[in-house]
Image (tube, coloured by chain):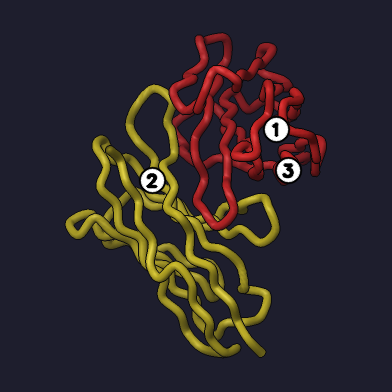
Chain colours: A yellow, B red
Amino acid sequence: EDKVVQSPLSLVVHEGDTVTLNCSYEVTNFRSLLWYKQEKKAPTFLFMLTSSGIEKKSGRLSSILDKKELSSILNITATQTGDSAIYLCAVGLIQGAQKLVFGQGTRLTINP
Amino acid sequence: GAGVSQSPSNKVTEKGKDVELRCDPISGHTALYWYRQRLGQGLEFLIYFQGNSAPDKSGLPSDRFSAERTGESVSTLTIQRTQQEDSAVYLCASRPSGGTDTQYFGPGTRLTVL
């Protein structure tokens, strides 16, 4: 069975700290790994990674994929209270439906 | 441009009633997905539509759940004889044709079954 596991499940830090969120996967027919941010209900797209070792960056957020270790990390530097959210990792599969298999999410809380 | 929209945003119903949830995908997006998210959990795939092809219903949890889509437009998810365990946020996502895996999500419908 295809599985995506995120850690930690919950993280509380102070504003200005740097955080690293982890995602590991065990799937057949890996195609891509995606990160989403979910603040209220709608997950919003952050990154899609397909190649190992190439960092994607957007402002204070960055992510990298390690296909050998079957994992990815999402880094957030100089955190702000607006970064508080659930961060979802999903793996895209090579198959007809191009389904995404989601992890359970990491709830990140940034305290002022 | 307009994103994915869903209605209603919240729905409270009594156990045993039927409910219908609606999703309007981004114009031109050929693929449409429904997911369920229980409290504190990740997203659980329910059903996938791609153009006029037969839908992938492999994620529907029981025969009380069904969904329809007309062409490449609106989709409705129907839950018959609702149970308390159906309480969740139901999210719809759409994706353009081509190779991207990126799905764009609507704001969801929070369903509460009393």
Q: What element carries label 1?
A: loop
Instruction: Give percent across and percent down for residue B12.
Output: 80, 40
Q: Mark 1 lies on which chain?
A: B
Q: Which chain carries label 2?
A: A
The reply to whether residue B52 is in sight is yes
Q: Residues within 10 Å of mark 1 (few under 14, many from 20)?
A: many
Residue at mark 2 to residue at mark 1: CA–CA distance? 22 Å
Whether pointer 2 and pointer 3 mark residues with C-beta atoms closer than 8 Å, the reply is no
Measuring 71% from the left and 20% from the top, which residue is drawn there?
B73
Residue at mark 2 to residue at mark 3: CA–CA distance? 29 Å
Q: Residues within 10 Å of mark 2 (few under 14, many from 20)?
A: many
In the drawing, does residue A110 fall left or right of residue B20?
left
What amino acid is at disc 2?
Val
The reply to whether residue A55 is in sight is no
Measuring 57% from the left and 52% from the top, which residue is drawn there?
A45
Q: Name the residue under label 2.
A: A91
In the drawing, does residue B53 fall left or right of residue B74?
left
Nearest the eye: B57 or A100: B57
Return the mark for residue B112: 3
Q: Mark 1 points at which residue?
A: B26
Residue at mark 1 to residue at mark 3: CA–CA distance? 26 Å
Sooner in the amino-acid sequence: mark 1 or mark 3: 1
Q: What element carries label 2?
A: strand
Q: Does B73 sit above or below residue A70? A: above
Instruction: Give percent across and percent down for residue B15.
Output: 72, 32
